[in-house]
Image: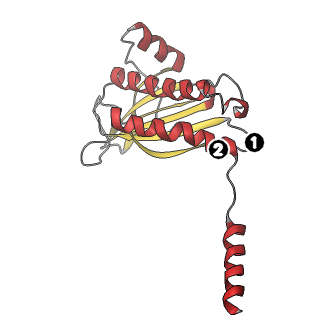
Amino acid sequence: MVFKFISIFLCFFFTSCHTRQPEYIRLSHGISDPYAKELKKTKGLCLIGSGGSMMDDVKKVNATYLSFAKLSVNEARNLYVEVVEGYLERFNRDEQIRPYLHNYPFTIENMKLMITFKDEYHRRRDGEDVTLMFMARGNLVYYCSYDYEKEDFVDLHEEPYEEAVRIVRGGDSGSSGESGCSLAQ
């Protein structure tokens, strides 16, 4: 009798503690997770953070990656555009998730990507090498390095995402002039 009581209690306990994930979150992971594995295999990008805005539907997808590559602004731009466009293409072509997308087509407004670059000793990149790139403030892509003397990020370049796409698709090398990506701002 005691065994039955314990068994029933455990069944009730374990089934009541399980909360079911909404279908759109499961579908979102079904798109993002394989792409993250593909990026690990093909680009050496390690997914270190993910999430988004998915209270009632899929409004935004966030991903943060770590890379050990040593990239210039131009090389980093190519990588950034390729990864963002890869996410957008996968979400837009998946017909199962389409009814759950906050807007279709999914656009750059629905994507937040950050890539951090470190050396083999897990130190931030410095000099002209990109150590951090992300998008903020009206879809501006920021490319930063790190100054170990100042113990702060250094602006390498900034540009609207649309300009980065144009440069990548058009082959223009872009500029690497003054920018405003300092996280202290």
Q: Residue furthest left?
A: 120
- The disc at residue 69 is none
Where residue 178 sits in the image (x, y, percent)? 41, 21
The answer to whether residue 183 is visible is no
Residue at position x 35%, y 43% in the image: 150
Q: CA distance from mark 2 to mark 1?
A: 10 Å
Q: Dot 2: within a 10 Å radius of its alpha carbon, few (fewer than 14), some, or many (20 or more) residues?
A: some
Q: Which residue is tagged 2?
A: 25
Dividing the picture into quadrants, the one containing residue 117 is top left
Q: How packed is label 1: few (under 14 Cα within 10 Å), some, or many (20 or more)?
A: few
Residue 65 relative to residue 101: left or right = left
Q: Quadrant of residue 157?
A: top left
Residue 113, given in percent of the width and then of the height, sits at: 51, 34
Residue beneath label 1, please? 56
| Mark 2 residue type | Ile
Q: Nearer the viewer, residue 50 or 30?
A: 30
Q: Residue at x 60, y 39 (%)?
A: 28
**SS of the residue at dot 2?**
helix
Expressed as whole percent of the image width and height from the top left, the position of residue 36 reads 45, 39
At label 1, the amino acid type is Asp
Judge left or right: residue 101 versus residue 181.
Answer: right
